[in-house]
Amino acid sequence: MVKPRHFITLNDLSADELRSIIQRAIELKKMRVDGIIHEPLKNKVLAMIFEKSSTRTRISFETGMTQFGGSALFLSPRDTQLGRGEPIADSARVISRMVDGIMLRTNNHETVTTFASNSKVPVINGLTDRFHPCQLLADLQTWFELRGDIKGKRVCWVGDGNNMCQSYMNAAKLLDFQLTIACPVGYEPEQALLSATASHVELFQDAKLAARDADLVVTDVWASMGQEEEQKVREQAFKEYQVNSALMSVAKPDALFMHCLPAHRGEEVSPEVLDGKQSVVWDEAENRLHAQKALLEFLME
Ligand code: CP
Ligand code: NVA
């Protein structure tokens, strides 16, 4: 069996491949505005397995497959034998004999890697506890559209050293930008990843020091999916890490603000920043569609 290409983290792509997917996403967006029908995945099927909730990821993958002439299956563990304990490897063997690609959103990163090693078709990580690479495709597309290449720029991550933060760390190394991370003690990203990306990543506790002269400021929820019971403890731990006008004022005057959404106004971001002029969160959300179409074309055509 020829091993399929998977997209489990950004490191599954070379820098050139990542740049070409971003450029293709920009082209596909324009083709849609121009009303050009493009159906490279006619009759192809993407299975989508969601262990967690989703608005953007589900709708963008499903819509993208339809626009490409194919279709997508929404599968929740509740409705499949996965929820009744059928082994992940067996599920991967079976599902990948029937469909042309599989996207998973899972609690544990290892579920996606186990799935991929037993799949005959490309597997896409639609978010795990450790990484959310599809969101990075959209964030990078948004940056490239509005500002050009990101090489050499300063990006500041504020908040939890979570799946989004860790995906930014991979992106920094691949596309050669500087990432400053401001996070409270105890919520840092994984040590091994900090070591692997040390040339491009700097860790701070003080958000204002980290955000100084940033070209882009990014944050995410304080409690990710599955951490709901830690909400109160996290609100205390992260209270100095809100992205608000005071924090944005130390970044470059034309700095952009991004958030993968859903956002909590008044927690990790103030309403005036989320709904303000520097925020590009709605473009970022829309670009999930275009960026993932570029990814689907790259992996499945
Ligand atoms: N940003 C993101 O992945 O959103 P969903 O959880 O709605 O898919
Ligand atoms: N860090 C968040 C991202 C949601 C898109 C979570 O994992 O819930």
Image (spheres, rainbow, N blue to C red):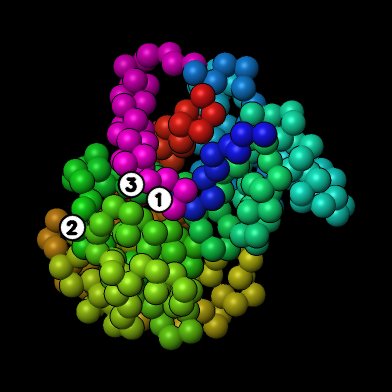
Q: Name the residue under label 2.
A: 152
Q: Is mark 2 on a helix, strand or loop?
A: loop
Disc 3/disc 1 C-alpha distance (Å): 13 Å
Circles 3 and 2, Cβ within 8 Å, touching? The answer is: no
Q: Which residue is at a point 19% across and 43% down the rendered structure image?
A: 148
Q: Which mark is residue 217?
A: none
Q: Distance between the residues labelled 3 and 2?
A: 14 Å
- The one of 21 and 226 positioned closer to us in this rendering: 21
Q: Which of 158 and 267 is in front in this view?
A: 158
SS at circle 3: helix
Residue furthest toward the left? Answer: 253
Identify residue type, mark 2: Gly
Give the side of residue 31 with respect to residue 232, left or right: left
Please give the name of the residue rendered at 47% of the width and 48% of the height, measured from the top-left corner.
Answer: 12
Task: List x then y, in percent, for residue 9.
Answer: 49, 53
Q: From which residue to which does the magenta span run?
A: 11-39
Foreground: disc 3 or disc 2: 3
How many neighbours does mark 2 have within 10 angstroms: few (below 14), some (14-19), or many (20 or more)?
A: few
Q: Which residue is drawn at 64% across and 29% down?
A: 100
Q: For the residues marked 2 and 1, what is the alpha-carbon distance in whole angstroms?
A: 17 Å
Identified by mark 3, the residue type is: Ala
Residue 249 image point, x, y percent: 17, 69
Q: Mark 1 points at which residue?
A: 136
Check disc 3 and report the residue beneath it: 15
Q: What residue type is labelled 1?
A: Leu
Q: Earlier in the sequence, mark 3 or mark 1?
A: 3
Q: Nearer the viewer, residue 245 or 281?
A: 281
Name which of mark 2 and mark 1 comes first in the sequence. 1
In the rendered image, the vertical position of residue 122 relative to residue 277, given as above or below: above
